[in-house]
Image (cartoon, grey):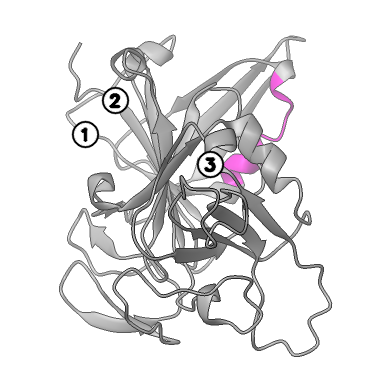
């Protein structure tokens, strides 16, 4: 089978701080037909979610059809086990502004691998609706007698983000210290402590039964999550996915309320703003936004009405 034959779903939120790419191979589907070398369209994710809100246990199969490359709507049909068929027409956006990221996971200095049930269990210690969560990574200390090993080998900390602009912040703040040897299948970090703060997402899909690989660098740099396939699983898997989240530009390591102190991996001070560079070389100041490379080389505009899914 041609490795280039696939269907990819690109999802981008309206604030351009989160991006997801899911790719399926044709053998995942009962029927997979493409007329032409490349067909693409863009729809609002909230419209797709309204179609898929029916419990999956009630659905026999789902079919998606785009009648023409220039069609104004695509068809989503749900065939239910009780014999009912529901058909929806979703309006396509005029410009299918498909974005792609220039991220090389091999260049990330820090990463860990965790099973989805274990990560769900760890994050269950936090409130159900935190705005941001911080991960602090330090080197594992093999010598328990070392004075720096005050947390008993727990080299990773998860904590709820403390907003320094809120003087009367009455929310419950949670700190969780983790021993990577006990909770993670893999943990890589060398050098000074680093931290990343990103919008919290406290639920993960366990249906694929694949470990989660999370890559990160330091404040202001996006984090990347992807499935961690085994040695023989990657070639036989019929899907791949990646989720990229922008991070805050302020470091929890320098806050007076921080339980630990340290410096960034390059020893520099972290400022309130950071200059990012777009794919066309233009620099701009942004609180939290991902560095994009436009696959179509169009203007770097985005939809203000809601999140997008591009196929």
* Labelled disc at residue 180: 3
Camera-nearest residue between 163 and 72? 163
Residue drawn at x 67%, y 66% is: 131
Write down the residue under mark 2.
6
Q: Which residues are magenta?
A: 47-56
Which residue is tagged 1?
A: 38
Q: Which is closer to the viewer, label 1 or label 3?
A: 3
Q: Residue at x 66, y 42 (%)?
A: 203
Residue 242 visible in the current orientation? yes
Disc marking residue 170: none
Name the main secondary structure of what is drawn in magenta: helix
Q: Is residue 54 magenta?
A: yes
In the shown orientation, is residue 9 left or right of residue 39?
right
Crowd band around label 3 with a 10 angstrom C-alpha radius: few (<14), some (14–19), many (20+) = some
Label 3 sits on a secondary structure element that is: helix
Image: 172 above or below 208: below
């Amino acid at each position: 089978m041609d490795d280039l034959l696939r269907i990819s779903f690109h999802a981008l939120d309206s604030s351009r701080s989160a991006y997801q790419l899911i790719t399926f191979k044709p053998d995942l589907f009962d029927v997979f037909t493409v007329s032409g070398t490349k067909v693409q369209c863009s729809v609002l994710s909230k419209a797709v979610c309204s179609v898929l809100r029916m419990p999956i246990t009630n659905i026999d199969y789902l079919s998606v059809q785009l009648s023409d490359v220039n069609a104004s709507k695509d068809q989503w049909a749900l065939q239910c086990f009780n014999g009912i068929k529901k058909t929806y027409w979703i309006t396509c956006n005029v410009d299918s502004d498909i974005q792609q990221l220039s991220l090389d996971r091999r260049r990330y200095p820090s990463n860990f691998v965790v099973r989805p049930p274990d990560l769900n269990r760890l994050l269950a210690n936090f409130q159900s609706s935190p705005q941001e969560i911080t991960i602090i990574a330090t080197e594992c200390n093999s010598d328990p007698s070392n004075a720096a090993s005050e947390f008993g080998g727990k080299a990773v900390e998860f904590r709820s983000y403390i907003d320094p602009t809120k003087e009367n912040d009455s929310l419950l703040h949670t700190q969780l210290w983790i021993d990577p040897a006990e909770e993670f299948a893999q943990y890589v970090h060398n050098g000074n402590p680093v931290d990343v703060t990103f919008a919290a997402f406290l639920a993960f899909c366990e249906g694929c039964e694949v470990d989660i690989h999370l890559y990160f660098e330091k404040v202001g740099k996006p984090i990347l999550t992807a499935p961690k396939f085994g040695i023989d699983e990657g070639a036989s898997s019929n899907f791949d996915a990646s989720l990229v989240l922008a991070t805050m530009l302020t470091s929890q390591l320098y806050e007076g309320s921080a339980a630990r102190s340290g410096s960034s991996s390059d020893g520099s001070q972290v400022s309130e703003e950071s200059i990012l560079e777009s794919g066309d070389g233009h620099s701009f100041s942004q609180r939290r936004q991902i560095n994009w490379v436009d696959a179509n080389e169009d203007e770097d505009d985005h939809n203000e009405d809601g999140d997008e899914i591009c196929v």
